[in-house]
Image (cartoon, grey):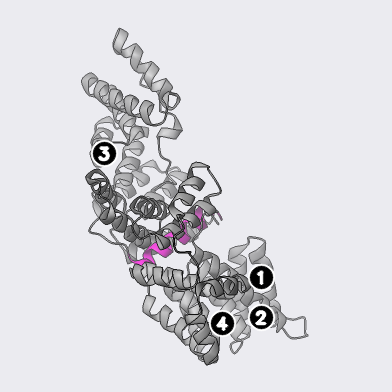
Amino acid sequence: MSARVTRAVAIVVVVSITALTAAAQERRATTGESPGALVDRARAAYAQGRFQEALETARRAAEAGPRSVPAQLAHGGMAEFMGEFDEAYQAYARAQALAPNDNATRYRVASFATRIGDYDRALRELDAILATQPKAAQFFFRWAPPFVQKPLLKRSPALEQFVDLQIDILMEKGDLAEARRLALRHAIVDSGRDYCADANQKKTGKGPSDEVFKAFRLAALAQPNAADCIWWYGQWLADEGYMRLGRLMVEEGTRLTSSQGNRDSGNRFVRIRLGGARPVAKRAESVFLIAKQRYLRDGDVDGAARLFDESLRLSPTFARPYSYKARLALDDGDREAAIRWLRRGVDADPESWRTWHNLGRALLAVERWDEAEHALTKTVDLFPDDVGGRLALARALYAQGKWDGYRKQTEYAVGFARGYRGPDVVKEPAAFFDKFQRWGPGPVLPPTPDPRVILGWNQD
């Protein structure tokens, strides 16, 4: 799994392992195919990164122990982890039918409900867990002052996870005021501390990405007027594929900023990166994220392709899965199929800058210069600061003998890149352009830009 995972995903993994361990402890003394023995094997396969084997073994455990709650939870956890959501739903339903008052089951159902966007169900399950505690404990948990809450949560990782899940649900639901109130009440954040400065320091210091992400999350919770930090947190989420919360944070940061330029930038980001008027369903987002992991982490091409298709079925205008379907086609050596998938992507979302960028690059690769020009012109119209897109457009124009267009695009791209990223990233295109200015066009096409200025396919 990517190093940069959300807290919700981390909780699912932790609780999955916990359920597998509990099931292993309850296994029968026999050494046959008992539910406990199978769950133990599934746990071992999971720990070693053999996720498909872990799922298949967890399925067998659930079949062998239809009345074993730990086996059903293990099955549900592995199915959820692998993006098999219908299967996970059924496994969790069986577990809850067997143990309707079991808090571990309630927590798992709440976590799964969050993943598929059923936020009200998730909050109900968490409220039900809290209602089972003694009245004094409930009162203490709800109303003890923050200086008492902080050490309480530090001593109890499970309680801290419980609170963090509540906060994440409220944030994704769009109830930022309640999420912030909860974070203050339970001392997840401290009043008066400048979390935004902390986050920016970690970002500029190039600290671990997980730490940077957590720092900006805390800034968004603690400082409701920190427009830039909230906006950056939203952009990071969106770049990682968390469309719903990313959109909420970008829109919130855009609303708060006093700069018209920043407002314009925020509105454009929503339009060209987050689907604009085409919001993505939470379940489609979750399936897409898991499909990426199955492809990039596991090399499970067939499983990933099926999940990308499922994501598109749930949200047909979600542009990102189209780029990944194109990448799968390229891996198979089928450039034309890749181009067809990208064309479907821009048909689904005509303002998806990244999909136009990928389409232009794919057309350049097969030397369809006029079609590449069209796609890359659209790319830089949507996002004028796309240096890689401009240099790719310049290459397409040069190949067609459109010298004025080549000159215009290259001058802009080189000037912008030098001012923003330094001269080295455009050294070769700049040198080629200098020769063009001095001696005119030659028989060789402009060089492909440095990879640092051409965003990769995995940066969908």
Amino acid on which the number 3 mark rests in the picture:
Ala
At 41% from the left and 28% from the top, the residue drawn is 449
Amino acid on which the number 1 mark rests in the picture:
Arg
**Are the residues tagged 1 and 2 within 8 Å (C-beta)?**
yes
Determine the secondary structure under disc 3. helix
Q: Does residue 372 appear left or right of residue 18 in this picture?
A: left
What residue is shown with label 2? 23
Residue nearest the viewer, comparing 132 with 291: 132
Q: Position of residue 230 (x, y in %)?
A: 37, 55
Q: Gap between marks 4 and 1, in whole Å?
A: 18 Å
Q: Residues within 10 Å of mark 4 (few under 14, many from 20)?
A: some
Instruction: Please report the bounds of the magenta region as a residue range.
Output: 281-299
What residue is shown with label 1? 43
Q: Gap between marks 4 and 3, in whole Å?
A: 51 Å
Q: Gap between marks 3 and 2, in whole Å?
A: 54 Å
Q: Earlier in the sequence, mark 4 or mark 2?
A: 2
Residue nearest the viewer, comparing 283 with 60: 283
* Residue 104 disc label: 4
